[in-house]
Amino acid sequence: LKLTLAELLEAAHLSNPFPQSAGSEKAYLAEYQRLEQQCAQQAETIATQVQAEALHYLESWLRNWPKVVYALNHDKPDLLAIKIVPLLRPLEQVLQHWGVEPVGTIAQQLPFDPQYHQVWSPPASALSQPTSQESHSIAPGTWVEVQRPGYTHQGKLLFRAEVIPVNLPGNSP
C-alpha cells in the first residue's frame, strides 16, 4: 500500500486526526524516531536495573562460590554439601523475588495433577527392563511422590514436577 496516512483515512471515510500541513510528515517521522529511541533507552535502563537488583541478591554467592569451587578442586574434595547449600540461598532469593515458585518438593507425597505433574522416567541406562509408555499413565488424584520439583513463574507453568506413583492403599496398580 503506497498510501499516506491521510489517503488511507480518506479512503476509509475517516477524518484525519493528524491534519496535513507543510512538513507534518517530517514532524511525525521525527516524533516516531524520538519515541522509538526513547523506548530502546527505557528497555536498556530496565535491563540494567534488573541486573543490578539480581547482582545485589547474588553478591554473597559471587564472593564465595569461587572459593568453594577452588576448595573442591584443590584442598578439600570431601567438603560436605551441607556447608555448600547455604551459599546457594541468594539464587533462591532471586527466584523467589521474581515470582518463581516450586511445584512440589522432593519426596513430597500428593495427589497427581496432570496439569502440574509428569511421570518421571529414569534414563534408559538406569532401567533393568524396558518400560512401556502405558506404565506412565496415572489417573488424576492418584498419590505420587515428587522426584524433581517443577516451577511456575508468576503463576505460569515453567515445567512440571516429575513424580512417581506411591504404593498406598487405594492407589491403582
Image: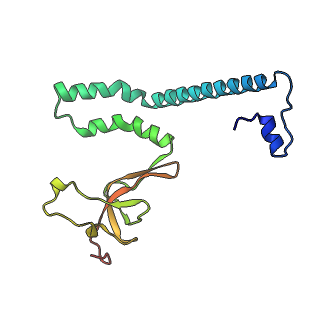
In the picture as drawn, the residue positioned furthest to the left comes out as 128
Colour mode? rainbow
Q: Is residue 3 above or below residue 144?
A: above
Give percent across and percent down for residue 29.
73, 25
In the picture as drawn, the residue positioned furthest to the front comes out as 2
Considering the image in quadrants, where does the N terminus appear? top right
Considering the image in quadrants, where does the C terminus appear? bottom left
Q: Quadrant of residue 34?
A: top right
In this rendering, position of residue 55 left or right of residue 76? right
Callout count:
0
- Of 39 and 167, which appears nearest the observer? 39
Q: Quadrant of residue 107?
A: bottom left
Q: Is residue 47 above or below residue 103?
A: above
Which residue is drawn at the image coordinates 45% and 41% (left, top)? 95
- Of 79 and 25, which appears nearest the observer? 25
Give percent across and percent down for residue 86.
34, 37
Q: Quadrant of residue 145?
A: bottom left
Which residue is drawn at the image coordinates 32% and 78% (left, top)? 170
Which residue is drawn at the image coordinates 87% and 41% (left, top)? 15
Give percent across and percent down for residue 138.
33, 70
Give percent across and percent down for residue 4.
76, 33
In this rendering, position of residue 8 left or right of residue 49? right
In this rendering, position of residue 18 left or right of residue 70? right
- Of 162 and 42, which appears nearest the observer? 42
- Of 141 and 28, which appears nearest the observer? 28
Which residue is drawn at the image coordinates 27% and 36% (left, top)? 83
